[in-house]
Amino acid sequence: MPRKLPTSFAALSALALLAMSVLDASAADQRVRVRGSVIGLNGQTLTVKTREGETLDVALADGWTVAGMARASMSDIKPGDFVGIASLPREAGGDGALEVLIFPPAMKGTGEGSYPWDLKPNSTMTNATVAEAVAAADGPTLTLTYQGKEKKIVIPDGTPIVTFAPATPADLKPGAIIFLIGEKSDAGAIAARRVTVGTNGVVPPM
């Protein structure tokens, strides 16, 4: 049976573990990212209609976990926080954010780096520590540090900013928006240990 994530300190730890699997740079190139809506959950089989229109059956491993989403804002982001930001190059130079995920404190440092991402063509995912936040005419600019490097990303107005929240298997109802990273076998079967699902009116923007 899947585990229900509690709403205590243990919940933050469980959500941090989920975050590690969701945006771990070291494993990003070896796994399959699935984005789409739930068709149904039958035992440990999650059927999803992907954003590409394909219907997939995902086998959920024993002890699988589910996490939800909660809305956050720029005012929640402070120097020292660890974030994951999907971004695209800007015509004016630098990068502009597509989404911002604020990780639980227990997650800090995991998956640190900047690497290709498939949210949109040419997008990048940067998992890094916030060094500075500066107001600018085209949106606040975050200075991120990772692995001895620095990257500045503009956060345009309207950019989704989220964090993890508790959820239960009951949230995996038909139509719910999900994001997961699964392992694909040579035969094409996909298996996953963790699922992120839209909750609180917030869909996974990753």
Image: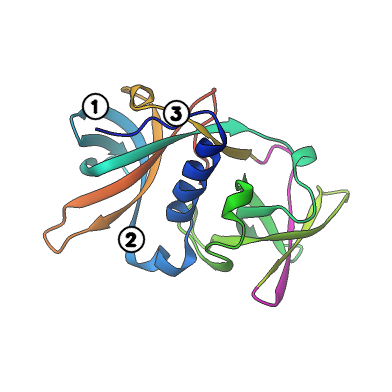
Tell whether 123 sits left or right of 5.
right
Q: Name the residue under label 3.
A: 167
Disc 2 residue crowd, few under 14, some 14–19, many 20+, Cα 10 Å: some
- Separation of residues labelled 1 and 2 (CA atoms): 23 Å
Tell whether 61 sits left or right of 87.
left
Would you identify the image quadrant in which residue 84 lies?
Answer: bottom right
Q: Name the residue under label 2.
A: 31
Q: Where is residue 187 in the image (x, y as percent from the top left)?
A: 11, 59
Stretch of the chain drawn in magenta: 147-159
Disc 1 residue crowd, few under 14, some 14–19, many 20+, Cα 10 Å: some
Q: Name the residue under label 1.
A: 40
- Separation of residues labelled 2 and 3 (CA atoms): 23 Å
For the residue labelled by badge 2, is the local secondary structure a helix, a strand or a loop?
A: loop
Q: Nearer the viewer, residue 57 or 70?
A: 70
Q: In this view, does 189 lie above or below 49?
A: below
Q: Residue drawn 36% across and 39% down?
A: 65
Reading the chain from its start, which is encountered first: label 2 or label 3? 2
Mark nearer the viewer, 2 or 3: 3
